[in-house]
Image (cartoon, rainbow, N blue to C red):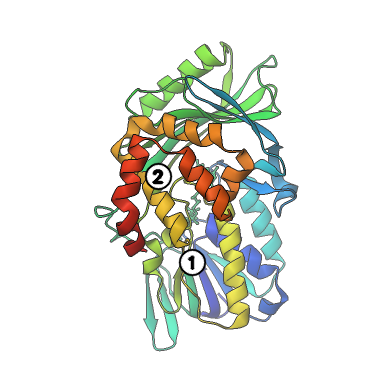
Amino acid sequence: MKNSCFKYIIVGAGTSGLHLIKSISEDKFFREKKILLIDKSLENNEEKCYSFWEKGKGKWDKIITKSWSNGYFISKDHLINLDLKDYKYKMIKSIDFHKYVKKCISSHNNIEFIKDDVINIRKENNQVIVVGNKTNYICDHVFDSRIPNDISLNNHISIKQHFKGWIIKTDVPKFDSKTFTIMDYRIRDIDKTAFTYILPISNKKALVEYTYFTKELVDSKEYDLKLKKYIKNILKINNYSIINEEYGVIPMTNYPFFNHTKDRITKIGTAGGWVKPSTGYSFKNSERNSKKIVGQLKKGVTLIKIKSKLKYYHMDKIFLDVLEKNNWFGEKLFSLLFRNNTTNKIFEFLDEKSNFFSELKIIKSLFSIHFIKSFLRHLFTGLKAN
Ligand SMILES: Cc1cc2nc3c(=O)[nH]c(=O)nc-3n(C[C@H](O)[C@H](O)[C@H](O)COP(=O)(O)OP(=O)(O)OC[C@H]3O[C@@H](n4cnc5c(N)ncnc54)[C@H](O)[C@@H]3O)c2cc1C
């Protein structure tokens, strides 16, 4: 450590921390400013597949594993072809993302990356003290991706997206590498929102992931059972090898994480509420929010809390409420969404960039007894809570 006083400290070199440091490193404005990135681990050996959608060319195109212009949504009664038009669905391996960002920042002398376990962060006068296991660090502003220990989800709508995925390899061509499957509900427990997600990397290799959107987690054996069943009965594959396995639990909640952001201490990533409650996606949000933060830092304004517009907050809340209260209804709900709206309108809506008319169309398309009940229940409480 050359000096433990910094302009900015980023705690956590995970998805949000790396997006933020990358955005900062790209801007000349920060060249003279000392910045510290701290993580409790310097290694990232776990290979995860991150996916996201975006229009046309993007910032990570150099390192993406694969992208798709077409997809499927499959329910028990419908097979829907998804034409992404000007969008692309992209997959990036976490290892490639980490390596790439770390390599990019390694040439910046003003940025240090160290290993330490951050135990506490507190504000003292006009500075922030970041208390690490090894030593203390001082800065003007900290960006913190640690999830607070004291959050209580009891008074909020909250389910979990939990999944296990296998990258499987076959000897003979078995996959249509041009088309991914966002959700396939043909194998599921009747009382749960659960589906298979497939990203074919080539005609002999694919990520096959079994995903639940439920209140409670399930036993590890459940995912294995479903994956085996899907591969055998739906994909009709008998011989394959598993070359990688991933497991994840992502919160899907309307908990106001952004309220943990305080003067000089900005929460980022999951801890800052950057995970879209109704989908669990956060990769692209991390890119967008990092850009917003950089813009605000350059203007020298007090950082504003990053949160969804009220209408999207409300829609997420209703969506989660339907899934929490009538978990079996998820297949029907997503089926209504994909059957009655084009994929690009759905993506615009989920990216919170839709216009009034497409929002109205989407809401109308979801009208069903459970959706209407949740809609009415939260019409007013939703407006209050944000
Ligand atoms: C297998 C898997 C697949 C996924 N697929 C997708 C996907 O396809 N699309 C998508 O959008 N999202 C996906 N996600 C979710 C996504 O990874 C998370 O939403 C995202 O990583 C959250 O970013 P974050 O920065 O908040 O947390 P993380 O990425 O978890 O980073 C937090 C970092 O903080 C560090 N840290 C924690 N505590 C301390 C401490 N006390 N001191 C120092 N450092 C600390 C950790 O070591 C870690 O590096 C997936 C998740 C998993 C597990």
Vertical arrangement, residue 149 with respect to residue 108, above or below: above
Residue occupying image coordinates x 52% and y 73%: 9
Q: Quickly name the residue at label 2.
A: 319
Dot 2 alpha-carbon crowd within 10 angstroms: few under 14, some 14 to 19, many 20 or more:
many
CA distance for labels 1 and 2: 21 Å
Pinpoint residue 26: horizontal percent, then vertical percent: 70, 68
Vertical arrangement, residue 113 with respect to residue 185, above or below: below
Residue occupying image coordinates x 55% and y 56%: 285
Which quarter of the rendered picture does the N terminus lie within? bottom right
Q: Secondary structure at mark 2?
A: helix
Dot 1 alpha-carbon crowd within 10 angstroms: few under 14, some 14 to 19, many 20 or more:
some
The amino acid type found where label 1 is placed reads: Ile
- Say which mark, if any, is on residue 306: 1
Q: Quadrant of residue 298?
A: bottom right
Residue 164 appears in view: yes
Q: Secondary structure at mark 1?
A: loop
